[in-house]
Amino acid sequence: MSDTHSQEPDAFAPQASPGELLRREREAMELSREEVAEALNLRPAVIDGLERDSYEEVPIVTYRRGYLRSYANLLGIDAEQVLAAYQARFGSDDQERKVTPVHVVNKPPSRLGAWMFRLATLVVIAGLVGLTLMWWQSRGGSQPPTPGDNAPVAVDSLDGTTTITEGGGEPADEPAPAAADDAATASEAPGDEAASTEASSALTGDVAPSAPPAGATEAPEAADEAPAAALEAETEPADEAPAPDAGVLRLTFNEQSWTEIFDATNQRVFVGLQEPGTTARVEGEPPFRLTVGNATGVELVWRGESVDLVSRADANNVARFTLGE
């Protein structure tokens, strides 16, 4: 199929179109349009358009010429003669068909658009301000206190007392010295009156025997009881120091250790991999069931005494035991 076939003189006559040349050669080789389309990897409609000189399926001139050349090479005829026939019939149309350049006209922005943009910006700003005010009022929104507010204000004085003042002003002034003197005079008035009564009684000779002050007769008894109480305080033994809490374990991890502890209620009160240099305080109800890994690197204190973990460790340096049975 690649060999060039001998063509009849009228096949390449100037009046023959490129599609007619291709169709005659295809029919001479007994090929169908579908077989040609499959061989060229084109649609059968494209092959039919090329043979009918209808190029609606191939509007681009470059692709059109390429398809004609490929079709001629497939049939084994001279591709230049097919292209010459195409040029003779449709070359003038291709030259007149030019692409009109697209001119981009830059128009200045209209003043209406600028005003609309400014208006939209103002609306957005006003909306933000309104939302801020609504948020402020929803928080209890009141305005900050002003100097004219009359709400009561608590003021701490130097002696530790608190003074409530009205109107948010300065705390009330301290009483005047005259008022303090009047209060002192009022408090001392009963004593002065009693002293004047005793003086008048002495002048008239009616001096009544003064009654012993209340509790004077009881003072010796209280004095006698004081040494006895002191002796009892000295003879009573001092309170014994409270025993350490039996429900508290204190652990010090000098090396990395995995430790697990259960109390009497079968509740796991401590578990985890502990890092060197950490301590732990475990509370629960004794007796405790302990599993201490790397026991030689752990210190255990219970009831104020150190528990020997080394003697309780197995060959893997893991101590499993019950404490407080």
Image (cartoon, rainbow, N blue to C red):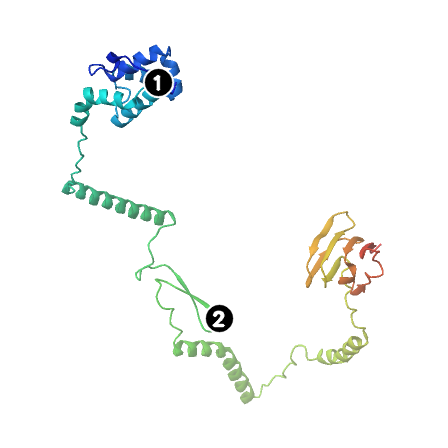
Q: Which residue is mark 1?
A: 75
Report the residue at 23% width, 16% height from top.
17
Indicate left or right for 25 with 273 as reference.
left
* Residue type, label 1: Leu
Going by the image, does 245 lie left or right of 143?
Answer: right
Q: Position of residue 176 (x, y in %)?
A: 38, 76
Q: Are marks 1 and 2 in contact (CB under 8 Å)?
A: no
Q: Nearer the viewer, residue 32 or 220?
A: 32
Dot 2, how many residues are within 10 Å of its Cα: few (below 14), some (14-19), or many (20+)?
few
Give 46 or 149, whichever is nearer the viewer.
46
Asked if residue 138 shows in the view, the reply is yes
Badge 1 local density, few (<14 within 10 Å), some, or many (20+)?
Answer: many
Where 244 falls versus 110 (above or below)?
below
Report which quarter residue 321 is drawn in: bottom right
Which residue is pictured at 31% across the width and 60% down the height? 146
The answer to whether one can see residue 299 in this image is: no
Q: Where on the picture, by quarter, is residue 318?
A: bottom right
Residue sitting nearer the eye, 120 or 168: 120
Per the image, label 1 sits on a secondary structure element best described as helix
Residue 172, image x, y percentages: 38, 69
Q: Residue at the spot x=72%, y=62% of the render?
A: 255
Q: Secondary structure at mark 2?
A: loop
Kind of residue at badge 2: Gly
Point out residue 55 in the picture as x, y percentages from the top left corner.
Answer: 25, 19
- Split into 4 quadrants, where in the image is the C terminus? bottom right
**Which residue bears the numbered disc 2?**
160
